[in-house]
C-alpha cells in the first residue's frame, strides 16, 4: 500500500493571466506615469523646508494591494489542489513445494562443493525472488518426509534449508514417488490459485511403495503442476570409505520427463551450478504472482482561503484610495 501526495492546479491555463501583471506595471511606470497631470504652483523656495522623511512611496501602497489581490484571484481561478493517491497492491500468491533429493549421490563434487550444497544455495536464491508465495519443502532419499510446511516466513525457511545435511534422511536410495506423494498431501488442502512442485533429483526411483508416474497422474488430477530438474553430469566423482571413485549417473531422465508432462510442467537438466541457477530463474518466471493494483484518489481544493485573501487585498486597496495615500489628481 503506497500513499502519494500530489500538488496540482485544476485549471493551470488560468496562470497565463499572470503575464498581464508585469505588462501593466511596465505600462504604468514607463508610459502612464510620464503622462500624469502636472500642476505648477508659484512659491518661494526659501520659505519651504525639505521634509526630514520622504513618504512619497506611500502613494503606491493602494496599487500594491490591488495588484496583490489580482494575483491571488488568478491563483484561486487556477484552483490549486492537494491530491492524495492511495495505491493498493494485492498479490495472489502461489503455493510451492520444493522436493529436494538428499541421497548419497548428492555428495558428488561435480557441483561445488557438492550437489546438495549447490542445490541448497539455489533454493535459497529462488525463495528470495518470490513475493507473497507460500513455500514448503520435502526431503527425500531412502524415504520422504515433510521438512517445512507451506509458509510465508522466508527467513525461517532459509534457516531450515541451511541446516539440511546428508543426515537429515537415511541416504541410501531415492524415493521420488514417495516425495511427490508427500508434496501432494501438503498441497491438496491449499486454496491458492496455483499449486506447484519443484522436484530436484540426480537419481532414479528405487525406494518407496508409490510409483512416480502414478503420483504424477494424481497430482495432475488435483490440478498440481510439477517441474522436474535432473542435476549432475553423466559421470561424477564421490568420496567413499575406500577413497574417491568415479560413478556413472543413474539419472532417470525418461521418468522425470514423463512426470513433468503428466503434471503439466516441464523437465530441465542442469549439469553445473549456473545451469541450475538459470533453470530456477526460468521456473520463477513461468510461475508469476498476479498483482492487482487499485488506485484511489482524494482531492481537496486549496483555493477558498486564497480567494478570501484576494478579496481582502482588493478591498484594502480601494479603502486606501480614500486615504492620504492616494492623490486623485494623478489619475
Image (cartoon, grey):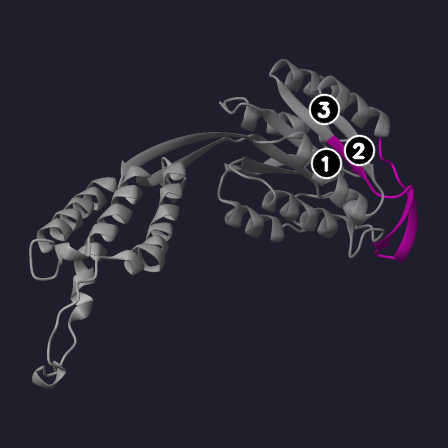
Mark carried by residue 320 = none
Compared to residue 188, the image places residue 36 above or below, namely below
Which of 73/304 is in front? 73
Q: Main secondary structure of the magenta part?
A: strand
Whether residue 166 is visible, yes or no, is no
Which of 330/295 is in front? 330
Residue 240 in the image: x percent, y percent? 84, 54
If you read the primary sequence from the N terminus, does the residue marked by circle 3 or circle 1 appear first? Answer: 3
Q: List the residue tagged with mark 2.
A: 268
Residue in the image at 66% along x and 43% along y: 169
C-alpha separation, residue under disc 1 versus residue under disc 2:
10 Å
User: Does 308 sit left or right of 189 as displayed?
Assistant: left
Q: Residues within 10 Å of mark 2 (few under 14, many from 20)?
A: some
Residue in the image at 66% along x and 36% along y: 284
Does residue 233 show up magenta in the picture? yes
Image quadrant where residue 264 sits: top right
Q: Which residues are magenta?
A: 228-252
Residue 9 in the image: x percent, y percent? 36, 40
Mark carried by residue 282 = 1
Image quadrant where residue 136 sits: top right
Residue 22 in the image: x percent, y percent? 36, 53
Compared to residue 275, the image places residue 331 above or below, namely below
C-alpha separation, residue under disc 2 versus residue under disc 3:
10 Å
View extreme (top): residue: 221
Mark carried by residue 265 = 3
Amino acid at each position: 500500500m503506497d500513499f502519494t501526495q500530489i500538488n496540482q492546479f485544476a485549471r493551470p491555463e488560468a496562470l497565463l493571466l499572470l503575464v498581464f501583471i508585469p505588462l501593466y506595471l511596465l505600462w504604468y511606470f514607463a508610459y502612464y506615469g510620464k503622462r500624469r497631470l502636472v500642476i505648477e504652483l508659484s512659491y518661494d523656495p526659501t520659505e519651504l523646508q525639505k521634509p526630514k522623511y520622504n513618504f512619497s512611496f506611500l502613494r503606491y501602497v493602494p496599487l500594491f494591494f490591488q495588484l496583490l489581490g489580482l494575483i491571488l484571484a488568478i491563483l484561486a481561478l487556477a484552483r490549486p489542489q492537494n491530491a492524495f493517491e492511495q495505491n493498493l497492491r494485492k498479490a495472489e500468491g502461489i503455493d510451492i513445494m520444493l522436493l529436494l533429493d538428499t541421497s548419497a549421490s548428492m555428495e558428488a563434487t561435480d557441483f561445488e562443493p557438492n550437489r546438495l550444497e549447490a542445490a541448497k544455495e539455489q533454493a535459497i536464491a529462488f525463495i528470495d525472488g518470490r513475493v507473497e508465495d507460500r513455500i514448503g519443502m520435502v526431503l527425500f532419499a531412502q524415504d520422504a518426509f515433510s521438512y517445512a510446511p507451506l509458509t510465508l516466513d522466508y527467513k525461517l525457511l532459509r534457516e531450515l534449508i541451511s541446516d539440511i545435511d546428508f543426515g537429515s534422511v537415511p541416504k541410501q536410495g531415492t524415493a521420488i514417488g514417495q516425495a511427490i506423494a508427500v508434496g501432494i498431501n501438503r498441497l491438496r488442502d491449499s486454496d491458492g490459485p496455483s499449486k506447484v512442485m519443484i522436484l530436484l533429483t540426480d537419481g532414479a526411483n528405487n525406494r518407496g511403495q508409490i510409483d512416480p508416474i502414478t503420483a504424477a497422474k494424481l497430482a495432475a488430477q488435483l490440478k498440481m503442476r510439477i517441474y522436474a530438474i535432473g542435476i549432475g553430469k553423466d559421470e561424477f566423482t564421490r568420496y567413499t570409505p575406500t577413497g574417491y571413485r568415479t560413478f556413472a549417473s543413474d539419472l532417470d531422465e525418461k521418468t522425470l520427463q514423463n512426470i513433468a508432462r503428466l503434471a503439466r510442467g516441464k523437465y530441465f537438466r542442469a549439469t553445473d551450478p549456473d545451469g541450475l541457477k538459470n533453470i530456477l530463474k526460468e521456473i520463477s518466471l513461468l510461475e508469476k504472482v498476479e498483482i492487482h493494483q487499485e488506485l484511489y484518489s482524494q482531492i481537496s481544493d486549496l483555493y477558498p482561503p486564497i480567494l478570501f485573501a484576494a478579496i481582502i487585498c482588493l478591498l484594502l486597496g480601494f479603502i486606501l484610495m480614500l486615504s492620504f495615500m492616494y492623490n486623485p489628481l494623478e489619475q
